[in-house]
Amino acid sequence: MIIAAADGSALGNPGPAGWAWYVDDDCWDAGGWKHATNNQGELKAVLELFRATEHLDDDLLVLCDSQYVINAVTKWMPGWKRKGWRKADGKPVMNLELLQELDAALASRRYRFEWVKGHIGHPLNEAADERARAVAEAFQRGAAVPSGPGWTRNGGTERATRDTRDVDEIIDDALDDAGPDDALFALDDLSAAWHTLTVELSTEEHDRLVQRARAEGLSPEDYLRGLI
């Protein structure tokens, strides 16, 4: 069984907001928005946890301090769907897009939610809360958003070793260094084999890459291939 905490944070609610899921210090992720609500952060944290583990067949125990999220998933969602995603009073359900994405991510998964009281020292919940709040504070300051290594277990891959160069500079250097016999692409030979390019990024540059890739709906690797 995978045991993970998921949490959200919004400064001002709505305001700069973050989300995070956490298994341990080597397996977690975080992100956010310039302007969102705490509930949106809570929903997004759970959604991204399910997405990060969608390739696995393990049971998933989600530790969550949001009764809104737990009730939405375990009690209210079936009724909302029957009513065309409307509440009992006929009004549209709030956070519809996130809820529909979460509904799709839950399909065929074995999971259980456990409510934990926030801010009482629960190790996993506190770790997720700290990371979600750090993202919200980064958006508030206009600083680089601190995302995590992502899923690194059971076939997951850890993020690349990092240095301080800009992503575009790394790619330009790689292209400049490639001689005639080391060209990344043979444009006149579409059957040419793939070449391996190792890219080292600083924490800030890697975070920028991940954010850009997510905005395009791509993996960081596919986004880099597009740049090249």
Image (cartoon, grey):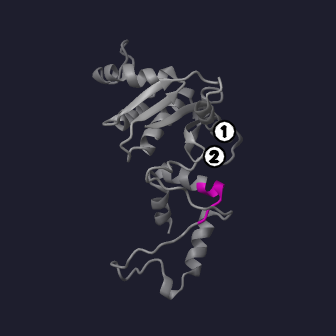
Disc 2 marks a residue whose amino acid type is: Pro
Identify the residue under disc 2. Answer: 146
Which secondary structure lies at badge 1? helix
The numbered mark at residue 148 is none
Instruction: Spot the residue most to the front.
Output: 1
* Category of crowding for the residue at label 1, using alpha-carbon neighbours closer than 10 angstroms: few (below 14), some (14–19), many (at least 20): many
Q: Is residue 40 left or right of residue 163?
A: left
Amino acid type at circle 1 is: Ala
Query: What is the C-alpha distance between the residues marked 2 and 1?
Result: 7 Å
Label 1 belongs to which residue? 134
Position of residue 104 measured from the top left corner of the image (x, y, whole percent): 34, 36
Q: In which quadrant of the rendered image does the N terminus lie?
A: top left
Can you give x and y, in whole percent of width and height, for residue 47 in the image? 45, 37
Q: Which residues are magenta?
A: 200-206
Q: Residue at x 57, y 28 (%)?
A: 38
Q: Locate residue 103 relative to residue 201 in the image: left or right.
A: left
* Residue 177 among those drawn in magenta: no
Task: Describe the element under mark 2 as helix, strand or loop.
Answer: loop
Q: Quadrant of residue 174?
A: bottom right
Out of 150 and 114, give the one closest to the viewer. 114
Left or right: residue 83 compared with residue 98: left
Q: Quadrant of residue 168?
A: bottom right
> Within the magenta stretch, is there residue 201?
yes
Q: Residue at x 36, y 13 (%)?
A: 88
